[in-house]
Amino acid sequence: MNRPHRPRPGRTARWLLAVSALAALPAAWAQPFPSKPVKIVVGFGPGGLGDTVVRTLAQKMSESMGQSVIVENAPGAGGITAASMVARAAPDGYTLLLVSGQNAFSPYLFKSLPYHPVNDFAMISTIGTFHFVLFVDKNSPLKTVGDVVAAAKRDPAHFNIGTISVGSAQHLSARLFTTMAGIDVPIVPFKSTGDVIAALRGGNIQAAMETVTGALAQIRGGALRAIATTAPERIGFLPDTPTVAESGGPALARYVSESWNGIVAPAGTPPAVVQRLNREISQALEAPDVRQRLATLGIEARASTPEALKQVFIDDAAKWRVVIEEAGIEKQ
């Protein structure tokens, strides 16, 4: 059976069809961001300080962006697992990473990294800063930084300072303290804050360094005594507790140790997307309920420009590299 002849489109018609198809592509490519859920990857398990902070932020961002902002925990290898995931993700703003001071100085703690901590990421914003506290058991005779230093110098073989794991910000803060104070005592690492406090209460260590958040409840409850904070000035959570710098004498007059959290994306993320995320984070951190929630965690909410976050990385790496090398911490 003969089929009816259908004329093929002429050159002009084909050209018009091609132009129409191409004209439709940018509409698909240029969908407003975000057009689907955004994921923030956290390099440790749920329930910790950073995890709680980012979940608070994510909830507020979800409200303002009109898309879910979800948190995915990817613990392992000191945060390397999570950072590797995000470094390899599509640079479209839909996969983000929670970072902290440990990300900045990780090149000096590990023999190799499968990514560059600065160059493989697009900086977005800081979230906030937090500090550490030097504390003792409530029954300890030590009441000041001077007391701690004097006791450590008097019997260094029997004076131990406890922190969580080697290479943590707490551990490095304690190492910086002993170096500047001129004392040579063991810094004993534990797996958790609870283990540190149990060792202190049991007399196995004589002092400890932990985040303000980790020790605040027991300090307020009277089980622990705060000696000094590592902040540059007194903090609102412990207004009656002096800083190490103000109470430690000339050797410690410049002592400051603080850490921070921030958000980054894979390198190559479009500038417009970075700016949108930066704006959303800044707005979320201005919300009174978010600021109050972070304050209860001992964190000062503080957004930044992408450029400022990059400088934080650079400055922290330079500072802690010296501490790590002087302490002789072996790379893992």
Image: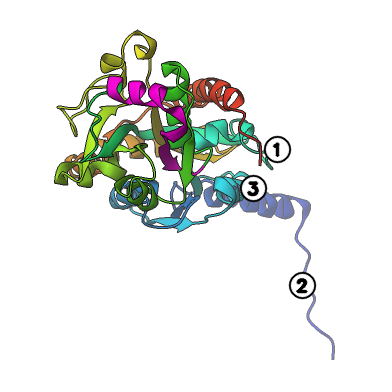
Question: Which of pointers 1 and 2 lies earlier in the amino acid sequence?
Answer: 2
Answer with mark 3 or mark 2, whichever residue precedes in sequence.
2
Residue on which disc 1 sits: 111
Magenta region, main secondary structure: helix
Q: Nearer the viewer, mark 3 or mark 2?
A: 3
Residue at the limit of the structure toward the right, as seen here: 1
Q: Which residue is mark 2?
A: 6
Q: Which residue is mark 3?
A: 88
Residue at image x 37%, y 20%?
256
Please report the bounds of the magenta region as a residue range.
146-165
Residue type at tag 3: Arg
For label 3, the SS is helix
In the rendered image, residue 139, in percent from the top left (x then y), is placed at 21, 40
Give the vertical position of 268 relative to 56 (above or below): above
In the image, 119 versus 323, the foreground residue is: 323
Marks 1, 2: nearer the viewer: 1
Label 3, label 2: how far apart the Cα atoms are: 50 Å
Residue 36 in view: no
SS type, badge 2: loop
User: Element under label 1?
Assistant: loop
**Quarter holding the N terminus?**
bottom right
Q: Does residue 264 sit above or below 42 in this rendering?
A: above
- The percent coordinates of residue 251 (x first, y second) are 39, 11
Q: Residue at x 22, y 22 (%)?
A: 242
Extreme residue in the bottom direction:
1
